[in-house]
Amino acid sequence: MIGFPQAVRPGLTTLGPQWNAARSTHHRIAWLARESSKPARSQVERWTVQASPQWSLEHLKDDPARVQAKLLRAFSEVTGIRATPSQIEIRRWTHARTMMPLGQSALWDDDAQLGLCGDWCLGHRLEDAFISGLELALAAIDVAHSNKAFS
Ligand SMILES: Cc1cc2nc3c(=O)[nH]c(=O)nc-3n(C[C@H](O)[C@H](O)[C@H](O)COP(=O)(O)OP(=O)(O)OC[C@H]3O[C@@H](n4cnc5c(N)ncnc54)[C@H](O)[C@@H]3O)c2cc1C
């Protein structure tokens, strides 16, 4: 996570590229998002950068300062932003992704009247969690009304 509060200037709305999010084919970086482009966020230029799973695995035990420097260099290469961020934070986020999703939106045990949902059912993103929860809720309502088994 990096921020450039020093870059907030009248008339300068963004720093660097004219896009706000991207999947990247750079070997170190998989995903970037300009946080300041999201609704109701502050104007301060801030980016979240996610390292690629492969590169993360290869560098899991590296010194955090070294990882930070390498990711920052990769960020500059992808975005063209050469400025030094005055805010920077790095997290080693293990178990970040579902490796093998369940493949169905939710689980329902009719006997126990118990359901399971979550991003892991369909993937690893917020949309997956949302759809999973919604589908389970709709199915549970359906079961309550008709007393049919969940499928
Ligand atoms: C740092 C970070 C950044 C992310 N950024 C993005 C992004 O930009 N876009 C995107 O789409 N996705 C992003 N994600 C992924 C997204 O947050 C998840 O896909 C989503 O939150 C999954 O929702 P969920 O309801 O399935 O699980 P969770 O949000 O993990 O909710 C599970 C809940 O269960 C609770 N819990 C666990 N065990 C128990 C227990 N035994 N008893 C009671 N409660 C329990 C937990 O405290 C938690 O509140 C990010 C995730 C992280 C960690």
Image (spheres, rainbow, N blue to C red):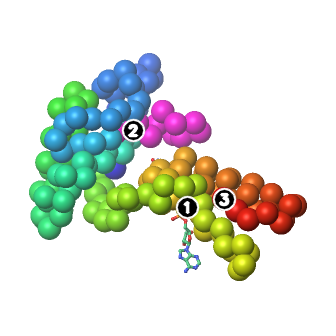
**Residue 86, x across and y down, in percent:** 29, 46
Question: Assess mark 3: CB under 8 A from ligand 1?
Answer: no
Amino acid of disc 2: Ala
Q: Residue at x 47, y 60 (%)?
A: 102
Amino acid of disc 3: Ser
**Residue 17, x across and y down, in percent:** 32, 24
**Residue 138, x across and y down, in percent:** 75, 54
Question: Assess mark 1: CB under 8 A from ligand 1?
Answer: yes
Residue 96 disc label: none
Residue 33 disc label: 2
Residues in magenta, as a range: 32-42
Q: Is mark 2 in CB contact (under 8 Å) with mark 1?
A: no
Task: Looking at the picture, tell me which residue is in the foreground, 38 or 51.
Answer: 51
User: Disc 1 marks which residue?
Assistant: 118
User: Disc 3 marks which residue?
Assistant: 151
Q: Quadrant of residue 65?
A: bottom left
Question: Assess mark 2: CB under 8 A from ligand 1?
Answer: yes
